Amino acid sequence: MKLQWKPPDGAKLWKLLDQYKYVLIVIAAGVILLLWPSGAGEKKQKAEAGAQSSQEAFDLAALEEKLSQTLSKVEGAGRVSVTLTVKSGMEQVLASDRSTSVTERGSSVEEETVLVDSGSGQEAVLLMQRYPTFQGALVVCEGGDNAEIRLLMARAVSALTGIGTDRITVCKGG
């Protein structure tokens, strides 16, 4: 005896649809959500923006010059020269994929840097960028013999660099 499939007649089909209508609604909603744009383009734009910001280099000389120009605008300071010392350099933390494998002889850990495709090839994914931390500062200014000017200079450099005022020296210069 061979079983053959027969298509259901209209009444049976409507009865099945009515019986499983909620399941079909959930399936249809799932398909719609899968086809809905996910914002992957936004993630790609953020990754590209992060890669562009990683290309910016920290320029100590430019920062010193900018500080000098800004501090020279303080009344009574005169010409100002700023020298900064850096405790640690610029550091970039890249995304990495770590895998651990366990064998009879022991375990090993492999770590690979995560790369994304960009217009000019592959670039590493930047998680975090740490700017240098400053160790100390020397400010030489024409008004350095005035206690009020020395205090203003030390506070200004401290506010702009995060260096404590105990590590900032202000001297009179000519």
Image: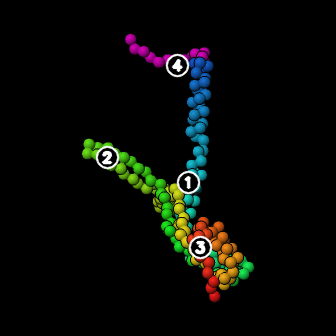
Answer whether residue 117 is visible to the viewer in this image. no
- Measure the alpha-carbon separation of dots 1 and 2: 35 Å
Q: Tell me which segment is drawn in magenta.
A: 1-15
Q: Considering only vertical position in the picture, is 97 above or below 145?
A: above
Q: Residues within 10 Å of mark 4 (few under 14, many from 20)?
A: few
The location of residue 78, given as percent across then percent down, is 69, 83
- Of the residues shown, which amino acid type is indicated by label 1? Lys
The residue pinned by badge 2 equals 107
Residue at left offset 70%, top offset 76%:
148
Are the residues tagged 4 and 1 within 8 Å (C-beta)? no
Q: Earlier in the sequence, mark 4 or mark 3?
A: 4
The residue pinned by badge 3 equals 168
Residue extending furthest toward the right: 75
- Measure the alpha-carbon separation of dots 4 and 3: 89 Å
- Of the residues shown, which amino acid type is indicated by label 4? Pro
Secondary element at tag 2: strand
Residue extending furthest toward the bottom: 174
Secondary element at tag 1: helix
Residue at left offset 60%, top offset 16%:
15
Q: Earlier in the sequence, mark 3 or mark 2?
A: 2
Residue 165 quadrant: bottom right
93, 122: nearer the viewer? 93
Q: Earlier in the sequence, mark 4 or mark 1?
A: 4
The residue pinned by badge 4 equals 7
Q: Earlier in the sequence, mark 2 or mark 4?
A: 4
The location of residue 74, given as percent across then percent down, is 71, 77
The residue pinned by badge 1 equals 44
Q: Residues within 10 Å of mark 2 (few under 14, many from 20)?
A: few
Q: Is residue 3 left or right of residue 58?
A: left
Secondary element at tag 4: loop
